[in-house]
Image (cartoon, rainbow, N blue to C red):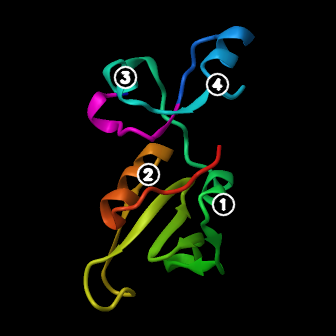
Amino acid sequence: MEQNEIRVGNWLNDPRPFNEDTKKFFKMPDNGYFKAKARDIEVAELFEPIPLTEEILLKCGFKKTEEYYASYEENIDVYTIGCFDIAFIDNEYKLWFCIEEDPFYSFSWTEIKYVHQLQNLYFSLTGQELEINL
């Protein structure tokens, strides 16, 4: 990972193997996920992003809404929290942006692959941290 991608509080994955004593000392869960501290940003290359999944979206407070259908009968699952709509399209999570007043004729998708991207985007748009309990 790059230093400019990480903010303090972002969830990251530490893929290094740790023994049980080290995990307890650093209060690390078994899955290797942890919240970044300032010191972690300096060694960002040691860590991996956490892929975004439906389970994580639900843990963030997103709700799965009705299924929407795009052109050519493409099935799209949509997850919503507040003003955010995240769709699962072609095996990728994407944030929906309406560019003009009529969302059915003008829209664009921005791919979101990782938990820290979602956290950073949410903070940028709302000024609040996205609560996640991994």
Q: Is residue 47 above or below residue 117?
A: above
Q: Which mark is residue 119?
A: 2
**Front of the two marks 3 and 1:** 3
| Horizontal side, residue 110 vs residue 87: left or right | left
- Give the crowd class for mark 3: few <14, some 14-19, many >=20 residues within 10 Å: few
In the rendered structure, are the residues bearing label 3 and label 1 in contact, judged by CB atoms less than 8 Å apart? no
Part of the protein shown in magenta: 2-12
20 to 34, vertically: above or below? above
Mark 3 vs 2, N-terminal side: 3
Q: Note whether 125 is above or below 129 in the view shown.
A: below
Specify which label sits upstream in the sequence, 1 or 2: 1
Q: Nearer the viewer, residue 26 or 47?
A: 26
Q: Disc 4 to disc 1, how far (Cα)?
A: 24 Å
Residue 85, above or below 92: below
Label 3: state its secondary structure.
helix
Q: Earlier in the sequence, mark 4 or mark 1?
A: 4
- Amino acid residing under circle 3: Arg
Looking at the picture, which amino acid does disc 1 mark?
Answer: Leu
| CA neighbours of label 1 inside 10 A, class few (<14), some (14 to 19), many (20+) | some
Residue assigned mark 4:
27
Query: Residue at the spot x=41%, y=48% of the render?
Result: 117
The answer to whether residue 8 is magenta is yes
Q: Could you say which disc has been placed on residue 39 in the image?
A: 3
Q: Earlier in the sequence, mark 4 or mark 2?
A: 4
